Image (cartoon, helix red, strand yellow):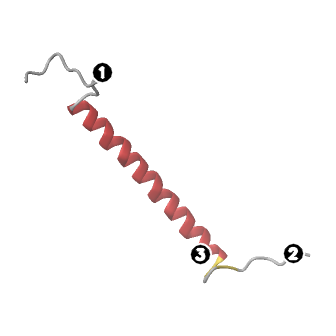
Amino acid sequence: MPKEIENVGEVALSRYEQIVAELRDVVEQQTQGQFTIMDRALEIEPMRPRGGFSPNRTA
C-alpha cells in the first residue's frame, strides 16, 4: 500500500497546496500585466510594416 504524502520539502502538504495556488495567481497577474503593457505600448507606437519603413515619418 502506498504511503500517504505528509510533507513536501519542509512544509505540510496542505501548506504546499496553498503556496502553489498563490504562486499561480501571481504568475497569472504578471502575465496579464505584460499583455496590458504591450497593448498600451502598441497603442502609443504601432508596429511598423516589415522592414521598418514608415511613410508618415520625417527624417
Q: What x and y, as percent, mark residue 12?
A: 64, 80
Q: What x and y, as percent, mark residue 34?
A: 36, 46
- The residue under the point 37% across, 41% down is 35
Is 22 positioned to the left or the right of 6 in the image? left
Number of residues whose C-alpha sits closer than 10 Å to that of mark 1, classed few (under 14), some (14–19) or many (20 or more): few
Task: Quadrant for residue 55, please give it.
Answer: top left
User: Mark 3 = which residue?
Assistant: 15
Number of residues whose C-alpha sits closer than 10 Å to that of mark 3, classed few (under 14), some (14–19) or many (20 or more): few
Badges 2 and 1: C-beta atoms under 8 Å apart?
no
Q: Nearer the viewer, residue 24 or 48?
A: 48
Going from N to C along the chain, the mark reached first, 3 or 2, is 2
Task: Quadrant for residue 17, please give it.
Answer: bottom right
Which quarter shows the C terminus? top left
**Relative vertical location of residue 10 with respect to residue 43 in this rendering, above or below:** below
Q: Amino acid at mark 1?
A: Pro
Q: Point out the frontmost of discs 2 and 1.
A: 1
Q: Going by the picture, which residue comes out furthest to the top?
A: 55
Badges 1 and 3: C-beta atoms under 8 Å apart?
no
**Relative vertical location of residue 51 with respect to residue 9 in this rendering, above or below:** above
Badges 3 and 2: C-beta atoms under 8 Å apart?
no
Which quarter shows the N terminus? bottom right
Q: Amino acid at mark 2?
A: Pro
Secondary structure under badge 3? helix
User: Mark 1 = which residue?
Assistant: 49
- The residue under the point 42% across, 52% down is 29
* Mark number displayed over residue 2: 2
- The residue under the point 56% across, 65% down is 20
Q: Amino acid at mark 3?
A: Arg
Going from N to C along the chain, the mark reached first, 1 or 3, is 3
Q: What x and y, as percent, mark residue 42?
A: 27, 33
